[in-house]
Structure formats: structure tokens, C-alpha cells
Image (cartoon, helix red, strand yellow):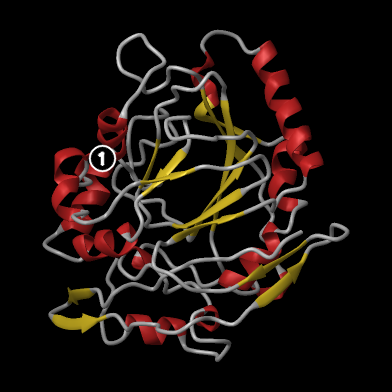
């Protein structure tokens, strides 16, 4: 398997003010050291080289084809016996079948998480117990009763981005947790089908948006309001033009077995599907051993191992990034 390149960022000197104390996040400059990871699967390894400012990355061929095929078989089996609308397969089902969770648990991904977030205390694992099924059918998010799209429509859909864990009415009894934000550290998207061109129902990410959003949350009373109002308070749609000025939403095109990793704070959406094919993907959400409530929403990299940013030299991640700022729940 060819070496992979992991591109991450710690930001561009994000300025925040908490508890009356001004603070500017440090800039982690320079190229990280190459790290080779081996999984329990024969011949599979990934080589990481840390650099960049996007906040998300594609790992090519990270999940073996057999695991991909097993997951596709299970999803298509469920499609075949499903009652009613296929809407339940559009990110509203969290499947616990082994064929789904093996995409994460039996691939190199637990080792990748260990590298990025650190080892869990007591030898704990990053094992996932369910995966979110995310299918996009031809015509989804397309204008009218069509399976067509264009750049203007793509950009409009992309402007209505989200970050996970903000309360909404999307799934009754699951996502309507108003008063709380259910954040985490890493969004892991496993691609099960090929997306060759833009407007194929692919994941769309805003490079650098994690820093902009963290800065926005630190202003006024945005964090408290976000907890109360949920997704509705995010500055999406026309408000994105100011917050994300200069940023361009990126189509995350992939082949089966490719994986996208994104910092929790990266703004993302799903493109219209004007292709003739169903887009298949499964998402997992991971918390590292340093996870501690909502503070990482203001300091996106606080829970990540700083060795991956400073060339292998151990650094105090929480002390360096949090500095003198005071976090209050």
C-alpha cells in the first residue's frame, strides 16, 4: 500500500477572550515527522506526514476491500427488507452489525486514532459499537424533482453546513438535546462507493473553518446560545459569506475504502447527488483520552497529541493551547 499524507492544522493565531483574559493560540510551524502505522491486517500500513491547514484529510485505501464489501452487503440487505421510506438510511440509522463496525474496528483506524489522540488509560480501546449509515440517492438535495445540479446550487447547499452534535429536530429523541452540545474529537467517514465528480452526494468540507468557528464561538455569548438553540444558531447560509470569507468548500471525492478524518470543528455538508449512483458511506465519531466537555470547541486541537505537530517532541497539548484562558461550563 502506498504511503499516505495526513494534512492537519492547528490554526493561524486564533484570538479569543475568555473570563476577561486575552489569549492568542500558538502557531505550530514546521513539518511533522513521518510515522508508520501497521494494522493487524497483513501488509497494511499507513505513513503519516503532518502538515497543512485544512483540518481534514483523506486516507486512501485505509479500509480493506473485503470489509467494504461486507458492509455494502449488509446495507443492501437492510435496504431490501426496509419498510416505508428510504429516509432512514440518510444518516438516521446507527447500525450495530459487525459488518458495519468492522469498517473501523478491524481496519487500521484504531491505530490511527491512537497516534492522533493518544493511548487510552488502562489499555482502553477506540472500539466503535455502531456506525451511522449515510446514503445519498440520485436526486437528493437537487433542485425540484430532478437529479441535476450546477455550481450555484452546489455552493448554496454548501453554505448550509453544520458541525455534528448541535441540537436539532433531525432525529426525534436523539438529536433534540437542546441545552447541550454533544461534541467529540474526530469525525471518521468511511467511503464505500466511488464519487468521481463534484455533485455526486459526496462529503463537502470547508478548509480552515474549524479556526473561524472557534473564534466565532469565543465572541459575545455564542457558546451559550448554541447550547440553547442548537444548530439554528450556527451562522450558516448567507451568514457564511462573512465568517468563511476567502474559504472555498471542497468536494471530498473518494474511492471505496478511502477514509476522511476531520477535526470536530470543521464545517461540512453533503453535496447534491446528480450522479446515477447511490453514494454509500458510514460515519464514526471518536473521543480521545483527553476529551473534556466543550472546551475543544474553542481550542480545536487541545485534545490531539502535540507530537504530531512539532516533529516528534513531546509538548503539553492542553497547557500550550489553552494558555491562561479560563474555561467555564
**Secondary element at image label 1:** helix
Front residue of 34 and 13: 34
Residue 317 higher or lower than 220, as above or below: below
The residue that mark 1 highlights is 159
Residue 31 higher or lower than 113, as above or below: below
Q: Residue furthest right?
A: 42
Identify the residue at image location x=68%, y=26%: 75
Q: Estimate the x, y position of residue 120 in percent, counting from the top left.
A: 64, 71
Give the left or right position of residue 279, taking residue 222 as reference: right
Residue 269 figure quarter: top left
Residue 199 figure quarter: top left
Q: Estimate the x, y position of residue 228 in percent, counting from the top left.
A: 23, 46
Identify the residue at image location x=38%, y=86%: 320
Give the left or right position of residue 120, taking residue 41 as reference: left
Total numbered badges shown on the rendered structure: 1
Q: Report crowding for label 1: few under 14, some 14 to 19, many 20 or more residues within 10 A (C-alpha).
A: many
On the question of residue 23 being in view, the answer is yes
Q: Estimate the x, y position of residue 85 in percent, counting from the top left.
A: 51, 11
Residue 255 higher or lower than 276, as above or below: below
Q: Estimate the x, y position of residue 24 in percent, counting from the top left.
A: 23, 81
On the question of residue 125 being in view, the answer is no
Give the left or right position of residue 306, taking residue 35 as reference: left
Identify the residue at image location x=68%, y=44%: 257
- Locate the N terminus and report the quarter of the image it occupies: bottom right
- Locate the C terminus and report the quarter of the image it occupies: bottom left
Amino acid at each position: 500500500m502506498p504511503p499516505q499524507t495526513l494534512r492537519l492544522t492547528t490554526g493561524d493565531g486564533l484570538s479569543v477572550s475568555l473570563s476577561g483574559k486575552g489569549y492568542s493560540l500558538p502557531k505550530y510551524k514546521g513539518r511533522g515527522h513521518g510515522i508508520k502505522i501497521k494494522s493487524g491486517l497483513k501488509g497494511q500500513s499507513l505513513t503519516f506526514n503532518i502538515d497543512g491547514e485544512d483540518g481534514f484529510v483523506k486516507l486512501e485505501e485505509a479500509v480493506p476491500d473485503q470489509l467494504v464489501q461486507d458492509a455494502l452487503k449488509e446495507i443492501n440487505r437492510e435496504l431490501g427488507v426496509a419498510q416505508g421510506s428510504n429516509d432512514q438510511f440518510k444518516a438516521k440509522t446507527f447500525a450495530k452489525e459487525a459488518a458495519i463496525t468492522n469498517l473501523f474496528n478491524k481496519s487500521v483506524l484504531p491505530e490511527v486514532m491512537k497516534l492522533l489522540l493518544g493511548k487510552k488509560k488502562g489499555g482502553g480501546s477506540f472500539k466503535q459499537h455502531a456506525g451511522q449509515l449515510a446514503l445519498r440517492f440520485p436526486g437528493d438535495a437537487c433542485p425540484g424533482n430532478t437529479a441535476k445540479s450546477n455550481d450555484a446550487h452546489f455552493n448554496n447547499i454548501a453554505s448550509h453546513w453544520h458541525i455534528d452534535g448541535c441540537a436539532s429536530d433531525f432525529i426525534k429523541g436523539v438529536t433534540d438535546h437542546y441545552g447541550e452540545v454533544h461534541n467529540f474529537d474526530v469525525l471518521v467517514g468511511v467511503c464505500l462507493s466511488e464519487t468521481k465528480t463534484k455533485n455526486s452526494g459526496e462529503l463537502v468540507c470547508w478548509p480552515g473553518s474549524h479556526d473561524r468557528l472557534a473564534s466565532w464561538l469565543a465572541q459575545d455569548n455564542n457558546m451559550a446560545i448554541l447550547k440553547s438553540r442548537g444548530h439554528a444558531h450556527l451562522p450558516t447560509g448567507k451568514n457564511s459569506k462573512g465568517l468563511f470569507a476567502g474559504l472555498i468548500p471542497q468536494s471530498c471525492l473518494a474511492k471505496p475504502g478511502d477514509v476522511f478524518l476531520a477535526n470536530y470543528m470543521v464545517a461540512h455538508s453533503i453535496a447534491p447527488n446528480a450522479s446515477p449512483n447511490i453514494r454509500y458511506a458510514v460515519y464514526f465519531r471518536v473521543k480521545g483520552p483527553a476529551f473534556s466537555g466543550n472546551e475543544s470547541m474553542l481550542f480545536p486541537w487541545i485534545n490531539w497529541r502535540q507530537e504530531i505537530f512539532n516533529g516528534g517532541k513531546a509538548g503539553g497539548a492542553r497547557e500550550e493551547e489553552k494558555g491562561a484562558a479560563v474555561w467555564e461550563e
